[in-house]
Image: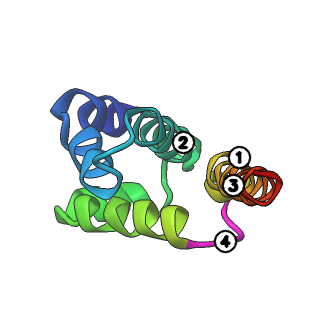
Amino acid sequence: QDIAIDIYNSGWLLYECKKICPNNRALHMDLFQEIMLIVLTYKPDGPLLKAYKKGEHLPFIKRIIMNNFNSKTSPFYKKYKLPMSMLELIEEVTKEDYEQDN
């Protein structure tokens, strides 16, 4: 948990999440929280600790961020991005229907 506290307090993770989705504050905060949950669920003697001891924890976490943001099977995608894409589709269809009626 000390690693998670260090990551949280450093501000690095929040900065990385803002870089990935700079125009959507809600989405980058959701990504930040999701990644923190993942970091907190690693076993104390797991791969995150090994990477931390080698000083390679930031690239390790960056990969977790990118995988979660870009994967269509990640929990992040299913919770946050999929509903957003469905909403965009509904708005598009609604707009097309409205334009056809006028």
Residues at circles 3 and 2 in contact by the CB criterion of under 8 Å: yes
The residue tagged 1 is 79
Residues at circles 2 and 1 in contact by the CB criterion of under 8 Å: yes
Closer mark to the observer between disc 3 and disc 4: 4
Query: In the rendering, at what x and y percent does residue 22 appear?
Result: 28, 48
The residue tagged 3 is 75
**What type is the residue that disc 4 sits on?**
Lys
40 or 66: nearer the viewer = 66
Nearest to N terminus: mark 4 or mark 2: 2
Q: Is residue 61 left or right of residue 70?
A: left
Nearest to N terminus: mark 4 or mark 1: 4
**What type is the residue that disc 3 sits on?**
Pro
The quadrant where residue 57 appears? bottom left
* Highlighted magenta segment, given as a residue range: 71-75
Of helix, strand and loop, which one carries label 2?
A: helix
Q: Which mark is residue 34?
A: 2
Closer mark to the observer between disc 4 and disc 2: 4
Residue 36 position (above or below residue 69):
above
The span from disc 2 to disc 1 (Cα, nearest Å) is: 10 Å
Query: In the rendering, at what x and y percent does residue 84 appear?
Result: 65, 49
The span from disc 3 to disc 1 (Cα, nearest Å) is: 6 Å
Colour scheme shown: rainbow
> Residue placed at 71% from the left, 48% from the top?
87
The residue tagged 4 is 72
Of helix, strand and loop, which one carries label 3?
A: helix
> Residue placed at 22% from the left, 66% from the top?
56
Quadrant for the N terminus in the image: top left
